[in-house]
Image (cartoon, helix red, strand yellow):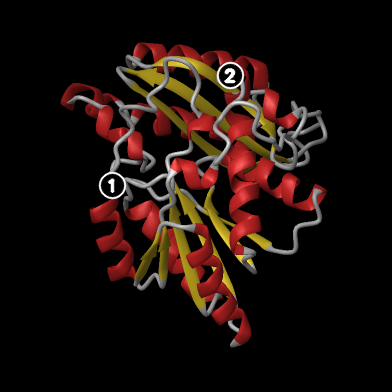
């Protein structure tokens, strides 16, 4: 596996692949890779002839007081894991390469409406930073496909909307969340958890399972959300939000909607954990 840090080198390598008629897959990450990331790389390898993984801790998606400075940076270990997985190219640009004119005043890409709710309401500007950097990576790599995890459900929908709205010619592949044996969704920020907090953390997944089961059985979504938030507090997790939404656009569900998703974000010590579960509500239960 080759590692590149500069944009001209990246473009030269990609031009060689395209000249050979190779299909290119992209896996964008912020590094500190775990098994969930590697699953994305393997999925890309199944669908493409060459796979580019990116490692870039994007400052534009961190708000004031968030963990930009302390976010774990483990590039050497990330490169080793990617090479073992069979990745062909690691692109790990510097901030000056990605934002040569600095962070302030940089052209931004934003998806209105969808980016302002749920995680977007708690982290103003976060998704503008995400869609801006992903748009840049799509333009730099011009992949045939890009692979993302469904743990960041809202992010996945935003990226799909952005790509469609801007007529970007690539497939966006979403993969199911990869979990620890006790159900906790794998995340680079799980490393922030103390031993005691780590024992509490799986309550998030269990609570979402119970919430999804209740809604699928016909429970009132609003009451079920309140019950789930209370259960999280009892378990020692502080809810940011617990919500039942439509899968397609994250709008609050109408009585006739059957394809739903339950989503939650919680604070646990230094960590902010997110998770979600899709569900189908039977038509009879939907009214």
N-term mark: 2 or 1: 1
Residue 130's spot in the image, x, y percent?
A: 58, 38
| Residue depicted at 81% across the width and 56% down the height | 167
Total marks shown come to 2
Q: Residue 14: percent from the left, percent from the top? A: 55, 73
Specify the quadrant of the image occupied by residue 268.
Answer: top left
Judge left or right: residue 80 versus residue 21: left
Foreground of the two, 159 or 101: 101
Say which of 7 and 30 sits in front: 7
Q: Is 93 above or below relative to 254?
A: below
Q: Estimate the spatial distance between the alpha carbons at disc 2 and disc 1, rounded to whole Å.
A: 26 Å
- Residue 225: numbered disc: 2
Callout 2: SS: helix
Give the residue pinned by disc 1: 181
Side of 172 relative to 187 (left or right): right
SS of the residue under disc 1 = loop
């Amino acid at each position: 596996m080759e590692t590149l840090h500069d944009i001209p080198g990246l473009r030269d390598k990609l031009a060689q692949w395209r000249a050979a008629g190779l299909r290119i897959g992209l896996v964008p990450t912020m590094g500190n890779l775990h098994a969930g990331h590697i699953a994305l790389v393997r999925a890309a390898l199944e669908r493409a002839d060459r796979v580019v993984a990116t490692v870039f801790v994007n400052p534009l998606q961190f708000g004031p007081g968030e963990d930009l400075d302390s976010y774990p940076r483990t590039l050497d270990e990330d490169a080793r894991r990617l090479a073992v997985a069979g990745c062909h190219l690691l692109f790990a640009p510097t901030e000056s390469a990605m934002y040569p004119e600095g962070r302030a005043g940089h052209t931004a890409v934003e998806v209105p409406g969808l980016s302002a709710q749920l995680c977007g309401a708690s982290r103003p500007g976060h998704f503008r930073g995400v869609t801006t950097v992903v748009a840049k990576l799509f333009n730099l790599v011009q992949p045939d496909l890009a692979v993302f995890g469904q743990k960041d459900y809202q992010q996945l929908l935003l990226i799909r909307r952005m790509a469609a709205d801007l007529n970007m010619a690539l497939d966006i592949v979403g993969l199911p969340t990869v979990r620890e044996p006790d159900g906790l969704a794998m995340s680079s920020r799980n490393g922030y958890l103390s031993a005691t907090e780590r024992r509490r953390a799986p309550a998030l997944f269990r609570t979402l399972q119970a919430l999804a089961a209740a809604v699928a059985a016909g429970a009132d979504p609003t009451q079920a959300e309140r019950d789930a938030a209370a259960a999280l507090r009892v378990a020692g997790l502080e809810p940011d939000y617990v919500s039942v939404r439509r899968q397609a656009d994250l709008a609050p569900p109408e009585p006739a909607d059957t394809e739903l998703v339950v989503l939650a974000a919680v604070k646990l010590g230094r960590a902010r954990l997110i998770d979600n579960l899709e569900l189908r509500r039977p038509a009879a239960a939907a009214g």
